[in-house]
Amino acid sequence: MYKSAQVANFNIVFGDEEKPMLDYFDSVIIPALTSGISKVVDDNEYRFMNINISKSKGDIYVLTGILVKKTILEIKSDINEAGELVEKDEKYSAAPYSSFVINLLNHRMIFMPNQKGSPSLSNFRSTVKYVIDAYTRRKNTELEDDNKLEYALINVVGIPSAKTMDELLENVEKINSLTLRFYPLNGDIDYSDAFGILTKEMREEVGSKRGEIVFKSPKSISGVKKILEKAAGTIDPILRVVTKGKSKATLKDYELSEKYQIEVGDDMDIDKEGEQLVDKIDEIDTMQFTSELHAAIYERNKGKIIPFVNKRR
């Protein structure tokens, strides 16, 4: 059978100096993801499990794991064997999950829901923010002022692809606005300079970590697609459109991101799914992108990664 997966940029920096994620890999990232801290939203509880470090076929360290949604399914009605609609009042506990793998060289990730109702990429983004922030707050209560951990600025952004955008925009009559949100990058090429008004230096001058620009009624859909594809998840886009049916819609990064159909065995367990996602890293072009700064950060911090290899938690 096949499962649908998508790619994203797992972008984290720390503190006012916007230090890269791997500088805090052993002191924040792994401890937070393995802390057992969960995020509760209504009747759903989200938590990370099976966190592990291994290597890809390309000899790059990767982080694998699952995001689990503990929930209660309510059944109020059903169709019986006679084909009649009958009332019910039943509740069942369920824990659908999504698997993920993060390339620690360029922090590109593959995210794959296991079934209908599994956590989405949006759920992953909000949960990782909550867990890392909660862990940092808890840890800082134990530390002296001089040793307190810096807080993370987290942006998990889907990486748009031409194919996905073609499919989504096929039914679009016009784009009302294109919003590009910029955020501090973890070794990526910063495309904000290309727009001439949102450079890192300008953000620092006004004391802001984020910025955005809005293009009103852009006429060139192909131009919009080129910008988003080139930025490759380093910009968080929001498209407000009018469909050919005259309905208004909002398209965000996780809807525009590149989708893949990944074949998995019917009897494949969670561990094997993780291994298969690791193998996919070397098959997906988007996952190969890297910069000289990525390589320098990665080499400098290998010593913080190695102690966690093949110690699933």
Image (tube, rainbow, N blue to C red):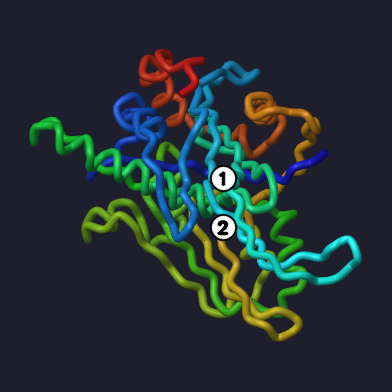
Please tell me whether mark 1 sits on a helix, a strand or a loop.
Answer: strand
Residue beneath label 2, please?
253
Tally of numbered tags: 2
Residue kind at label 1, given as amino acid type: Ala
What's the residue at 60%, 37% (across, down)?
A: 99
- Quadrant location of the N terminus in the rendered image: top right
**Near-viewer residue (175 or 68):** 68
Residue beneath label 1, please?
8
Q: Are marks 2 and 1 in contact (CB under 8 Å)?
A: yes
The x and y percentages for residue 278 are 63, 26
Check the image and report above or below for 153 versus 215.
above
Specify which label sits upstream in the sequence, 2 or 1: 1
Whether residue 17 is visible, yes or no, is: no
Check the image and report above or below for 294 versus 177.
above
Q: In the shown orientation, is residue 70 left or right of residue 80?
A: left
The x and y percentages for residue 223 are 64, 64
Q: Which residue lies most toward the left here?
A: 145
Q: Which residue lies most toward the bottom here?
A: 246
Check the image and report above or below for 31 versus 140.
above
Q: In the shown orientation, is residue 309 left or right of residue 57?
A: left
> How far, Cα to Cα, is label 2 from label 1?
9 Å
Q: In the shown orientation, is residue 162 left or right of residue 250?
A: right
Q: In the shown orientation, is residue 299 left or right of residue 143?
A: right
Residue kind at label 2, given as amino acid type: Asp
The x and y percentages for residue 95 are 58, 44
**Near-viewer residue (199 or 108):** 108
